[in-house]
């Protein structure tokens, strides 16, 4: 009996879930046709119908990761500083789903650095993320919630802070539980709301 389009789509969903589970459990470097086949309970020969080689699997995995990340529920918040805080909280590994997604993103950095095309692609992704944060910073400045300054520079600093916190939380989750991550972010945002000339110069003469 010939397979229907529904059968094909169902099988493709199964393959997608297997790819996702492998990446979440082993990281991006553990993603192989053999590992996906084992997760799926199938032969590697079956997978070659979807992925003729490792590069095809990697490309598909990155597309799947971006789709899953984009589909994650986002926090709703008012404009300005609350919106900036919500966007930064959405990046942190505060839930199981966010932790899995961040584990995969971070473990994929090695592959991205080794491939010029992926390097450019990732640079574009992070540039768009910074631009999104910059818009929120600018609104917070218009509302008087943040001191004046270059929104792009402030956004770049916030982006660097949050990615650094992500890495620490993934490597040492016991030291960086969700409530501590949130507290550190709030400390960072509090520091941002203080004009530089009001912080005082603590350097010794």
Image (cartoon, grey):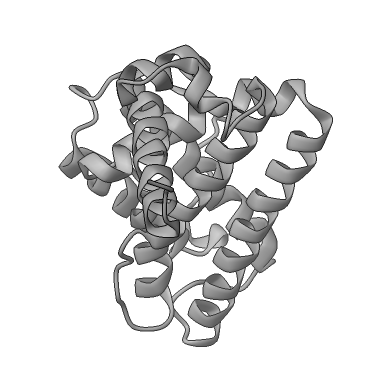
Furthest residue to the bottom? 143
Q: Is residue 47 left or right of residue 167?
A: right
Residue 116 % position (x, y): 83, 30
Task: Determine the residue positioned at 44% across, 31% down.
Answer: 104
Q: Is residue 185 left or right of residue 152?
A: left
Number of marks in the rendered image: 0
> Between residues 199 and 174, which one lies in front from this camera angle?
174
Task: Determine the residue positioned at 30% across, 37% down.
Answer: 99
> Between residues 110 and 40, which one lies in front from this camera angle?
40
Residue 156 vertical position relative to residue 46 in the rendered view, above or below: below
Residue 38 % position (x, y): 34, 15
Residue 167 % position (x, y): 43, 28
> Between residues 203 and 124, which one lies in front from this camera angle?
124
Residue 145 visible in rendering: yes
Residue 143 % position (x, y): 47, 87
Residue 55 vertical position relative to residue 180 in the rendered view, above or below: above
Residue 165 vertical position relative to residue 12 in the rendered view, above or below: above
Which quadrant of the structure image shows residue 176? top left
> Between residues 49 and 196, which one lies in front from this camera angle?
49
Task: Determine the residue positioned at 79% across, 41% down.
Answer: 120
Furthest residue to the right? 116
Q: Is residue 144 left or right of residue 54?
A: left
Residue 32 visible in rendering: no
Task: Determine the residue positioned at 58% across, 49% down.
Answer: 157
Which quadrant of the structure image shows residue 96? top left
Which quarter of the image is occupied by the C terminus?
A: top right
């Amino acid at each position: 009996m010939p397979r229907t389009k529904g059968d094909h789509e169902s099988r493709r969903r199964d393959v997608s879930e297997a790819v996702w589970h492998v990446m979440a459990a082993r990281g991006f470097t553990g993603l192989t046709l053999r590992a996906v086949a084992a997760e799926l309970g199938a032969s590697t020969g079956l997978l070659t119908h979807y992925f003729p080689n490792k590069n095809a699997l990697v490309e598909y995995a990155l597309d799947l990761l971006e789709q899953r990340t984009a589909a994650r529920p986002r926090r709703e918040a008012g404009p300005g500083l609350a919106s900036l805080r919500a966007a930064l909280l959405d990046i942190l590994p505060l839930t199981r789903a966010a932790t899995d997604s961040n584990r995969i993103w971070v473990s994929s950095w090695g592959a991205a650095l080794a491939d010029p095309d992926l390097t450019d692609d990732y640079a574009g992704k992070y540039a768009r993320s910074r631009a999104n944060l910059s818009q929120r910073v600018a609104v917070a400045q218009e509302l008087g919630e943040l001191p004046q300054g270059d929104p792009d520079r402030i956004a770049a600093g916030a982006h660097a802070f949050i990615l650094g916190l992500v890495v620490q939380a993934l490597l040492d989750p016991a030291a960086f539980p969700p409530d501590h991550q949130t507290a550190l972010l709030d400390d960072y945002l509090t520091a941002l709301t203080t004009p530089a000339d009001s912080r005082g110069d603590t350097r010794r003469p």
